[in-house]
Image (tube, rainbow, N blue to C red):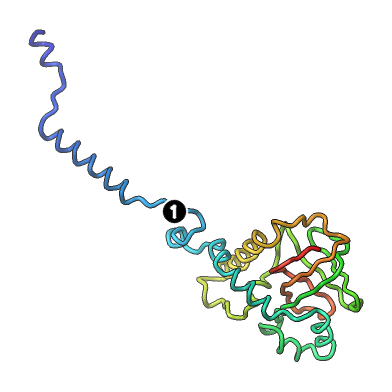
Amino acid sequence: MNATDISMKPRIGRRGVIVGAVALCTLVAIGLDTTVVTIGSEQDTRVDGFSPDAYGTKEFPRIRDDVAKRAVDAKTLAAALAEDKSAAAKKYGTGGAMPVLPVRVTGTVGEGKSGIYDINVDGLDNVRIRVQTGPAINGTDLRDAPGDISFGAFKNQIEYQDAGAGVNRAMKAEVLDGIDTANLTGKTVTVTGAFKLINPKMWLITPVEVKVQ
């Protein structure tokens, strides 16, 4: 080996060793301080702001239990609405101009369209009762059903609206995804849910529980 060969070999000085060691320590520290965040988790909510799905997953069990506890038999509710709509809304519902009413109904499933089925109940021929089963679950009836989820709890109208959608998705995952909702016609069901009182003779129920016989 001659002098030229020796001079061409890279030399790693003391400073290079120190710099390399510091870089390695930095990478190790970053790795130790890294947290894996699951989408929709509580950590995800803190990092990325409001998460509708995390909110829905958290709130739906409470909403489900509240609606089930207060649910009124369909015949009882229909009679009360026919007698005095305002009094019935005040007694059973939550909300202002368009209150949300909790109800439990048992009947035979009729024809469906776009995931919305009629439920035929003996003795309630003067009331059209329908239930939405997806794939799209519309409205904010479940969000509004307890009466204690207000706009002021959210950053803006978008978050408030998204909260309702998150609750609907959580309901669908828990209640509807295990049911063959494409083939309900002719079957007897018991549906517990809530509907917004727009027309006392036309109910569109968003379910929190569906039992198919």
Specify the farthest residue to the front. Answer: 213
Tell me the residue that label 1 is attached to.
Answer: 37
Q: Dot 1, crowdedness within 10 Å: few (<14), some or many (≥20)?
A: few
Q: Is residue 196 left or right of residue 157?
A: right
Identify the amino acid type marked 1.
Val
Specify the farthest residue to the left. Answer: 3
The image shows residue 119 at horizontal and vertical percentages of 85, 68
Q: Residue at x 50, y 64 (%)?
A: 50
The image shows residue 136, relative to residue 93, as above or below, that is above
Quadrant in the rendering for residue 20: top left
Q: In the depicted view, which residue is nearer to us: 8 or 75?
A: 75
Q: In which quarter of the image is the C terminus?
A: bottom right
The image shows residue 196 at horizontal and vertical percentages of 73, 76
Q: Which residue is drawn at 78% across and 80% down?
A: 73
Quadrant in the rendering for residue 82: bottom right
The image shows residue 85, relative to residue 45, as above or below, that is below
Q: Residue at x 22, y 43 (%)?
A: 25
As helix, strand or loop, the secondary structure at mark 1 comes to loop
Q: How many marks?
A: 1
Q: In this view, does 125 lie to the left or right of 11?
A: right
